[in-house]
């Protein structure tokens, strides 16, 4: 099971029901292929950075889901078939999330370690800072 | 470079990319901030393609990615940054290129 993010753009002239219908279809497609939807975010109509199918705006929807290769394949097929969908982007994020978690933990560890050692020399370092040409005090 | 003294070219230690202290001591006219990686300083781990506000800080007016030598972003961060910008471009969150807003009217 992998975690993916699917961001897609629906034509801005689609009404709320159509958006809802597309969301429902995709949710069904995800669960039918053994995946699970984590969250759906509707960003609403946004300005596009460049013209797309002669339109300057688009309705952005973000779906975060879990699933395997078949889920992504089916989802992308459905998005491609649907005329209301102008563009879509699938990003695999599970490794990114793992990496972020690792970074966060390392940071916490460092923060927990820090206050004991450099707490005392913190004051003298500040005094030394305005003296010009003191490259030794610049970096830790 | 107007500050060459006696025709001598500016040494590497006097270049604007050096530390700010070095610039001050050389009586440079323009105070140049020492460039640091924004992501490392602000402790931003996640460079997300959805964060348009953050990413657009690293685009030129024309929509090009600003090089490291100008923005000061460190190598690993720049790699992640450019990845994110390219993803954002793909889904029309950021432009591939924007037309110049001059009266000269190049690019048609």
Image: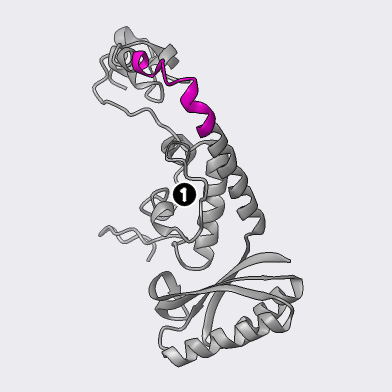
State the residue in front, A100 or B68. Answer: A100
Q: Is residue A82 visible?
A: no
Judged by its main secondary structure, the magenta piece is helix
Report which residue position mark 1 lands on.
Answer: B65
Relative image position of residue B46 (x, y in whole percent): 52, 50
Residue A88 visible, this orientation = yes
List the single residue furthest toward the front.
A116
| In magenta segment, residue A78 | no
In the displayed structure, B108 sits above or below B58; it is below
In the depicted view, which residue is nearer to us: A116 or A23? A116
Using the image, name the chain to which the residue with label 1 belongs.
B
Q: In the picture provided, is A139 more to the left or to the right than A105?
A: left
- Where residue A72 sits, quadrant-wise, is bottom right
User: Which percent across, then down, holds residue B93?
Assistant: 45, 65
Residue A35 horizontal side relative to residue A110, left or right: right
Where in the figure is residue A45, as x and y percent of width and height? 39, 77
Q: Secondary structure at mark 1?
A: loop
In magenta, the rendered stretch is: A111-125
Q: Identify the residue shown where x is 47% and y is 68%.
A: B92
User: How many neighbours does mark 1 have within 10 angstroms: few (below 14), some (14-19), or many (20 or more)?
Assistant: many
Q: Choose between A104 and B91: the one closer to the eye.
A: A104
Of the 4 image quadrants, the one containing the N terminus of chain B is top left
């Amino acid at each position: 099971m992998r975690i993916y993010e699917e961001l897609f753009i629906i034509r801005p002239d689609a009404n709320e029901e159509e958006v809802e219908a597309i969301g429902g279809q995709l949710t069904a497609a995800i669960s039918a292929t053994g995946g699970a939807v984590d969250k759906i975010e509707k960003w609403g109509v946004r300005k596009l950075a460049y013209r797309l199918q002669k339109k300057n705006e688009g309705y952005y929807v973000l779906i975060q889901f879990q699933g395997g290769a078949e889920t992504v394949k089916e989802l992308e097929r459905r998005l491609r078939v649907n005329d209301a969908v102008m563009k879509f982007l699938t990003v695999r994020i599970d490794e990114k999330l793992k990496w972020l978690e690792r970074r966060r933990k390392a940071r916490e560890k460092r923060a927990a370690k820090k206050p004991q050692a450099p707490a005392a020399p913190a004051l003298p370092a500040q005094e030394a800072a305005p003296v010009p040409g003191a490259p030794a005090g610049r970096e830790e | 470079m107007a500050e060459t003294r006696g025709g001598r070219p500016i040494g590497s230690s006097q270049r604007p990319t050096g530390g700010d202290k070095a610039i001050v001591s050389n009586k440079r006219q323009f105070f140049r901030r020492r460039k640091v990686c924004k992501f490392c300083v602000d402790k931003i781990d996640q460079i997300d393609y959805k964060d348009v506000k953050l990413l657009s800080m690293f685009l030129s007016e024309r929509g090009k990615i600003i090089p490291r030598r100008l923005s000061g972003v460190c190598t690993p961060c720049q790699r992640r940054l450019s990845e994110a910008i390219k993803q954002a471009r793909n889904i029309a969150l950021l432009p591939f290129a924007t037309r110049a807003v001059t009266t000269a009217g190049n690019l048609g």
